Amino acid sequence: MNRKAPMSRSRLRGFTLVEVMVALVVLGVGMLGIAGLYVTTLRSSGGAIYRMQAVNLAGDLADRIRANRGANVAYGGPAANNNCYGAGSVDCAPALMAANDLFVWQAQVAASLPGGNGAVVVNPGAVATDPFIYTITITWQGSGETGATAPSYVMQLQI
């Protein structure tokens, strides 16, 4: 009969150094993957906060435009601090109110978003009865993005 000799106790004693090193490499790669996922999540959540602020700021200006319908194309003009509201404010004509609204709004955009910039383009309708189309654009500096890849939000409004 051909019987195999039982293995010696020293061969059955645990892990070899190679097995331990492979386990450490696998664990290290897994930890690096988790760290990368965490960094990506932090970047995405920061971008989502800025996008939410841009949406709110565009909605704010849209409400100002709706409240001052007589200004029409004045919202496409330059911004100016005309002291139309607040302490010691004066009563402003619609065009002056539009310039003041733009001044306050652009200051809010710059304060709320990193490198924030807001602009409005007004397109009157082809016929006098057509509505005005307001295009509100907000851009800001994202993390690692510049120029053409900078994040932006665009809202169109017809009144």
Image (cartoon, rainbow, N blue to C red):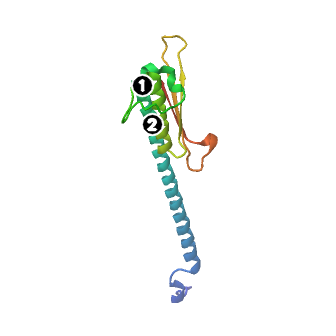
Position of the C terminus by quadrant:
top left
Measured along the vertical axis of the image, is residue 2 above or below residue 64? below
Residue that mark 2 sits on:
57
Mark 1 falls on what kind of element?
A: loop
Residue that mark 1 sits on:
92
Distance from disc 2 to disc 1, alpha carbons, whole Å, reads 23 Å
Circle nearer the viewer, 2 or 1: 1
| Extreme residue in the left direction | 87
Q: In the rendered image, which quarter is residue 56 located in?
A: top left
Q: Amino acid at mark 1?
A: Cys
Q: Residue 118: x, y in percent?
A: 52, 36
Residue 159 in sight here: no
Mark 2 falls on what kind of element?
A: helix
Q: Residue 53: x, y in percent?
A: 45, 41
Position of the N terminus by quadrant:
bottom right
Q: Amino acid at mark 2?
A: Leu
Asked whether disc 2 touches disc 1, contact meaning CB atoms under 8 Å apart, the reply is no
